[in-house]
Amino acid sequence: MARAADPPRDEPRRAGPVRRAFRLAVLAVTLLFVVAALAISCALVVYTAYRHDLQNGVFALLLAVLSAQIAINWFLWKDEEE
């Protein structure tokens, strides 16, 4: 006679060391891109302000705002994963 299957458990699966290392690597790489985007956009804002280039200044400010939004979303994503 066959045994009844165990009901599925609602317990979260524990992350192993390989999974944890991979997650940290992904977080580090994405943080690197976020910091680079923030640095480049801030430098572009400063450069356009220094050159008094109003046509490109709007683009630089838009890029800085989008980069800041990416940084905020990265922190929210990091906290959601934990």
Image (cartoon, helix red, strand yellow):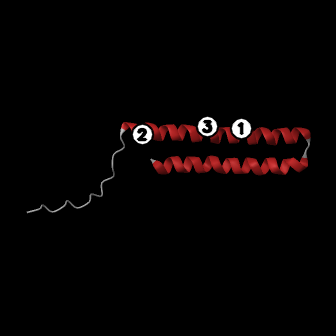
Residue name at image x 46 percent, y 39 percent = 22
Q: Amino acid at mark 3?
A: Leu
Q: Which residue is mark 1?
A: 39
Q: Are marks 1 and 3 in contact (CB under 8 Å)?
A: no
Q: Is residue 61 left or right of residue 18?
A: right
Question: Regarding mark 2 in the picture, which secondary structure is present there?
Answer: helix
Q: Is residue 33 left or right of residue 28?
A: right
| C-alpha gap between disc 1 and disc 2 | 28 Å
Q: Is residue 61 above or below residue 17?
A: below
Q: Earlier in the sequence, mark 1 or mark 2?
A: 2
Residue name at image x 30 percent, y 58 percent = 10
Residue 32 disc label? 3
Q: Amino acid at mark 1?
A: Ala
User: Where is residue 31, by image quadrant?
Assistant: top right
Point out the residue furthest to the front here: 1
Quadrant (top left, top right, bottom left, bottom right) of the N terminus: bottom left
